[in-house]
Image (cartoon, helix red, strand yellow):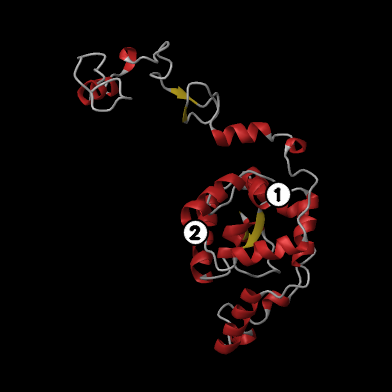
Amino acid sequence: MNKCNFCEKKLSNYKAKRCRDCYNKYLLKNGKNTNRYIDGRTLKKYHCIDCEKEVSYDAKRCHSCATKERFKDSKNHPNFGKHYTEESKLKMSKAHLGKKLSNRTKEKMSKAHKGKKKSIQHCRNISKAFKGRKVTWGKKISITRKKLKYIGTKAGNYIHGLSYLPYTSKFNEELKEQIRKRDNYTCQYCGMTQEECLKKYNRKLDVHHIDYDKLNCNEENLTSLCQACHLKTNGNRDYYYAYFTYIMESLNA
């Protein structure tokens, strides 16, 4: 019968080299006590050079960062120049039908797309894809409005058809620029600057008529607003009229 190499106990199995107790002690060895110890490289913690995730000792980047670095140039991608067939597209669309994205994936997608600008070709492709499609949400809104009859004279913000009147010749770009300059190129409701407005909405600050009269183009009746705040002023007009008149009176005082 065989004997254990360490304690010289008799072993029932002729293939075994250690008894159970000695084998357990061998397994419990850590660090420098192990037989395969080289230089302690596995005991240290290593991090990805891009995202600082923990990686193995022989890796510079994590898997996701390594793939991004590898496929920076789209020509290196194995699917470069290849196109899906119509059959594969149909299969993919059927597979994704009814699937709902979790909030976590939505957050990841929004973070990934933040700051990215769509190219002109990308915008054209999107417009081509949506051509001929029927918009459902717009119909739903229009149907509900028709049911409630909030159209024309019955609308909440209707004031004797003033919205159909054209602007006067006095309300030109020179006057608008003069009002923006007077207001230090900032929105008089939320404080957004014109530079921020150009980045967010791709347009300059709007000039708003405080009394909602298009014909009244006095400087005291005009104020600078960003696009979002200008849209807000269409509702609750009494509040915004009182708010901006108070600001103009305080400025002139």
Could you say whether the residue bearing mark 1 is in a helix, strand or loop? helix
Q: Where is residue 186 in the image (x, y as percent from the top left)?
A: 60, 47
**The quarter of the displayed image where residue 15 is located:** top left
Which residue type does callout 2 highlight? Answer: Tyr
In the picture shown, does residue 68 fall above or below 138? above
Q: Which of 187 and 198 is in front in this view?
A: 198
Looking at the image, is mark 2 or mark 1 earlier in the sequence?
1
Which residue of the protein is positioned furthest toward the front in this rendering?
A: 1
Question: Disc count in the image?
Answer: 2
Q: Position of residue 194 (x, y in %)?
A: 64, 46
Can you see residue 192?
yes
Q: Which of 112 and 216 is in front in this view?
A: 112
Q: What residue is shown at x 36% (from left), y 14% (from top)?
A: 35
Q: What residue is shown at x 80% (from left), y 51% (from top)?
A: 121
Asked whether the beta carbons under mark 2 and mark 1 sit within 8 Å of each other, the answer is: no
Q: Residue 178 carries which label?
A: 1
Q: Which of 97 and 170 is in front in this view?
A: 97
Which residue type does callout 1 highlight? Answer: Gln
Badge 2 crowding class, 10 Å Cα cut-off, few under 14, some 14 to 19, many 20 or more, is: few
Q: In which quarter of the image is the N terminus?
A: top left
Residue that mark 2 sits on: 246
Q: Where is residue 29 in the image (x, y as percent from the top left)?
A: 28, 19
**The quarter of the displayed image where residue 162 is located:** bottom right
Can you see residue 170?
no
Q: Distance between the residues labelled 2 and 1?
A: 21 Å
Residue 125 placement, left or right of 152:
right
Residue 230 placement, left or right of 167:
left
Q: Nearer the viewer, residue 69 or 120?
A: 69
Q: What residue is shown at x 64% (from left), y 79% (from top)?
A: 139
Badge 1 crowding class, 10 Å Cα cut-off, few under 14, some 14 to 19, many 20 or more, is: few
Could you say whether the residue bearing mark 2 is in a helix, strand or loop? helix
In the picture shown, does residue 223 fall above or below 93? above
